[in-house]
Image (cartoon, coloured by chain):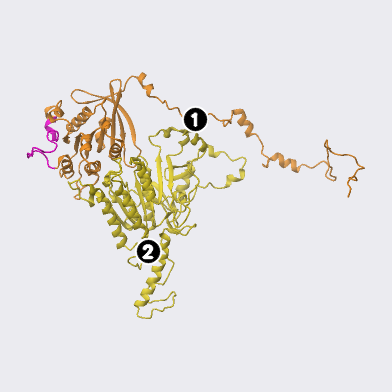
Chain colours: A orange, B yellow
Amino acid sequence: MLDSLLALGGLVLLRDSVEWEGRSLLKALVKKSALCGEQVHILGCEVSEEEFREGFDSDINNRLVYHDFFRDPLNWSKTGEALPGGPLGALRAMCKRTDLGPVTIALDSLSWLLLHLPCATLCQTLHAVSYQDSCPPGDGSPVGKVHVLGLLHEELHGPGPMGALSSLAQTEVTLGGTMGQASARILCRRPQQHPTDQTQWFSILPDFSLHLQEGPSKEFQPQSDPHIPLVDPMAHLTFNLHLSKKEREARDSLTLPFQFSSEKQEALLRPRPSQATSHIFYEPDAYDDLDQEDPDDDLDI
Amino acid sequence: MATVATCGGDAVGVGSAVATASKSNVTSFQRRGPRVSGTNDSGPRLVSITGTRPSVRNGQLLVSTGLPALDQLLGGGLAVGTVLLIEEDKYNIYSSLLFKYFLAEGIVNGHTLLVASANEDPANILQELPAPLLDNCKKEFDEDVYNHKTPESNIKMKIAWRYQLLPKMEQIRPVSSSRFGHYYDASKRIPQELIEASKWHGFFLPEKISPTLKVEPCSLTHGYIKLLQFIQNIIYEEGFDGSNPQKKQKNILRIGIQNLGSPLWGDDICCTENGDSGHNLTKFLYVLRGLLRTSLSACIITMPTHLIQNKAFIAHVTNLSDTVVGLESFIGSERETNPLYKDYHGLIHIRQIPRLNNLVCDESDVKDLGFKLKRKLFTIELESGFAFFHSAHF
């Protein structure tokens, strides 16, 4: 799954934390796109260019187009090399590109951009950059896919900006892991479809190639198993909702009072033994007065 | 208000008849009858707009929301001149479906549409509308409903055996296009000729505003101001507010605004906790409601309220809207595996129903409503069974 991350296009968020850093994964994905022949732009804001290029081969380094905002972020030196408009201007310039072919833009890091730019403007610019391929230009020529990889340090931001960026992103990769093995939880939001959630164990080799792994040994896994018990609504009742087999059979064989069954029909149609006379069957109560000669004469009217 | 609009509509109808009578150079004292003037205007007639009906409770003019089940919960439909606010579910799957049902209902009834979005081109949104189920699809509809019978429902009723023969309430047949409220097939797209025959206006925010390099605080309202101006222009030019007396049949304007309040509109209410910029959205809703009340229009807005950090703000937004419906889907939450909710895809909360020309509103007593998206149909049902367990466990 990790290796097909770039196939989807759009904004990919790499959320890392202090324990599990994400820059090596970012560099691994950058290397992968460079090897696929895509154009790669790097917006370097957090680390210096030398540090970012460290570990890459020379042919990959030659393919990377690096926009350096680390050395002089506010453009104080006013030399011609610094790009006008800062990182936002650079991103907007990438929106207006006219050359075709797939492009990967790596933002190192998106956290830096979030802290220096207003969140709404950043979201609008990212949306404009990453959704270029859904609106083809007027001449009908297909524009290649744009992949935007953003490194986001999730501990630096509150739930507001994180939620806003998550809703904008096509794919969200959260880095974690146990016992020295890194894992990536990949949440893929496709429009109008259910999001998919997968976890992939991986490691990054020293030359920044991605090595997918099986996962840690099985004995560690039950720890994360459901400590949330499955809720059974039928438990702890004062009455019984379940029927045993015998009870169910007894219930099924019960005849109901108003059902017109064949036995009842026969009983009604069966000729009565004595139909001419009618008998009254009376059983006296304990309180009944059976004195025939006393027809309420004691009543004084 | 919409009742005023209907009376106003009647008045305009009469007025236009009188106006045309006076144009034909006779005295203005005319006998009101079917042949009052020489023009083809047939005099004062009952102003009935397709796709609307008066409410049985207070005579309010209602339009369908596109989902007959939701219409029933809202007391017959959505009142003309009001706003329906939908609080989006987390991944915006079901709220966008309701949005599309609303627009598709407008197309089927021949209403004019106005679609505004900051993240998708309105033309693309219209391409993805669901296809209406008309009478010739009745047989497929029946099959679909009966195929979903669970084994428990096949047990014949033993005690109340006379009720077996009665049909269940939710098996309502799909209706033809002359009725109020239609059914849609969510798996099929609306036929292209219906879209082309309909009249629609689109507002796609990235096209309307040019990104300037200066980042000013007042630019937050820029997108909203543009949208309000756009809506106002359409209402005025096409005469939905009665400003240009129309000879032709009156129509309803259905406005759909997607993801209002998200950062793509330039609003950072979802990003920050303090309520400084919250006034942009509240002002927008206030002005929008003013525009709607004075015109024959109905509006649906979807808002990602799960992203809004300031919870008091959600209360402000609820007060400024008329009907508020919240969707909560079970995807990704622990309720997905809960056996109580296994039949449903999510919960639907009716947060507010307006009191229009009334002292009371049509609030139903039922609070536990779940929705599910079957293969073709979006149904809203009372959560069957163990409703009292709900309160015990949560």
Q: What residue type is labelled 1?
A: Asp
Q: Is mark 1 on a helix, strand or loop?
A: loop
Residue B87, numbered circle:
none
Q: Which of A238 and A2 is in front in this view?
A: A238
Residue A77 magenta: yes
Q: Give the range drawn in magenta.
A: A60-84
Q: In this view, does B378 lie to the left or right of A130?
A: right
Q: Is residue B382 left or right of residue A53?
A: right
Residue A232, numbered circle:
1
Residue at mark 2 to residue at mark 1: CA–CA distance:
56 Å
Which quarter shows the N terminus of chain A?
Answer: top left
Q: Is mark 2 on a helix, strand or loop?
A: loop
Q: Which chain carries label 2?
A: B
Residue B134 on image: x %, y % = 43, 53
Q: Name the residue under label 2.
A: B250
- Going 40% across and 43% down the picture, which residue do you hit? B327
Q: Mark 1 lies on which chain?
A: A
Q: Is residue B314 visible?
A: yes
The 10 Å Cα crowd at callout 1, few under 14, some 14 to 19, many 20 or more, is few
